[in-house]
Amino acid sequence: MRIVSLLPAATDIVAELGLAADLVGRTHECDWPPDAVAGVPVVTAAGFDVGDLSSREISGAVAHRGSGLYTLDAELLADLAPDVVLTQDLCEVCAVSYRKAAGVLRVLDAGPRVVSLEPRTLPDVLDTLVEVGKILDVPETAADRARGLRERLVRVREAVSGAARPRVAAVEWLDPLWPAGHWVPEQVSAAGGEPLLASPGEHTGPMTTDRLDAARPDVILLMPCGFRPERTRAETRPDDWRGRAEQVWVLDGPAHFNRPGPRVVRGAEVLAHVLHGVAVGDPVCEEEAHRLI
């Protein structure tokens, strides 16, 4: 089966299902697993170069460009002749939308199946893995992988059971401040924290620093969407956060929190370490969780 992924989380899912070799096209942001995707043709590009832009400047550019954030190489997509195209309609800032992908393919009369993935909660993410497994004709593999991920979440919950639950504010954008919603509150809860500022499944919006302070968090988690930890640390000064919480951590947002793929389970394991010093799964490295304050 020839698969094109227009969503980094979908690429993660395809790899989890053991089908990375069937990927014939991907986005410019699909970077996992590195060795598996390195040689896969790239069919998208960003509408502007974020380069050294600050969070505020990126926000302004996004607002200005609207739905023109990404370009899709229609000619290359046609040449790749995919059987299935995996995309989304949850957030036009995150990836090429289902509407844009379907529109291009209708014009090309390419004929592949276009599938929109719309997980909003942690259970949705695991259910999506099963759904994609059925679409890609590996239902048993998908069921097995989902079962293993659910078991890992159970181990996280057991490891923090009975511990005091710190008040946790998860931030997915720095300027303007933006609380992390969708599946992140459930990751926090699973890891033994009390999530603030967003409910499970909620599509959030920008907030003021006053709202953050009024929530009285014990822990602030910085996980900007699309920012690797080094980029977050470069834009974040400890003094900006001092006095707002007892602890402030920089996390790898794209790897474990921003993308609704199987690695969100690793995100819960990382949070168990951050919130309670508990080791679940592989040891947490500095790039996964760095304490700023």
Image (tube, grey):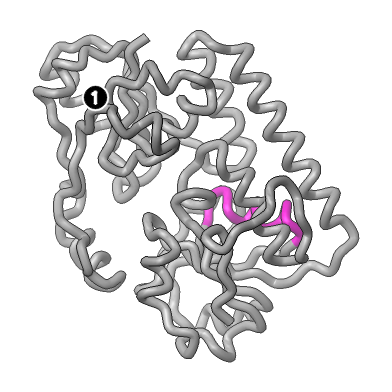
Outermost residue on the right side: it is 162
Q: Residue at x 16, y 47 (%)?
A: 68
Of 249 and 40, which appears nearest the observer?
Answer: 40
Residue density around tag 1, few if under 14, some if 14–19, many if 20 or more, within 10 Å: some
Residue at position x 18%, y 12% from top?
110
Residue 240 on the magenta span: no
Type of amino acid at the residue the image marks with label 1: Ala
Does residue 197 appear to the left or right of 240 in the view shown?
right
Left-right relation of 290 to 254: right
Q: How far across and down, in percent of the image, does residue 280 sit? A: 75, 50
Q: Residue 144 is drawn in which quadrant?
A: top right
Residue 236 at x, y = what percent?
41, 78
Question: Is residue 41 or residue 126 the one in the foreground?
Answer: 41
- Tell me: residue 271, above or below residue 32: below
What residue span does the magenta drawing correspond to?
181-192
Name the residue that disc number 1 marks.
Answer: 102
- Residue 188 within the segment the image draws in magenta: yes
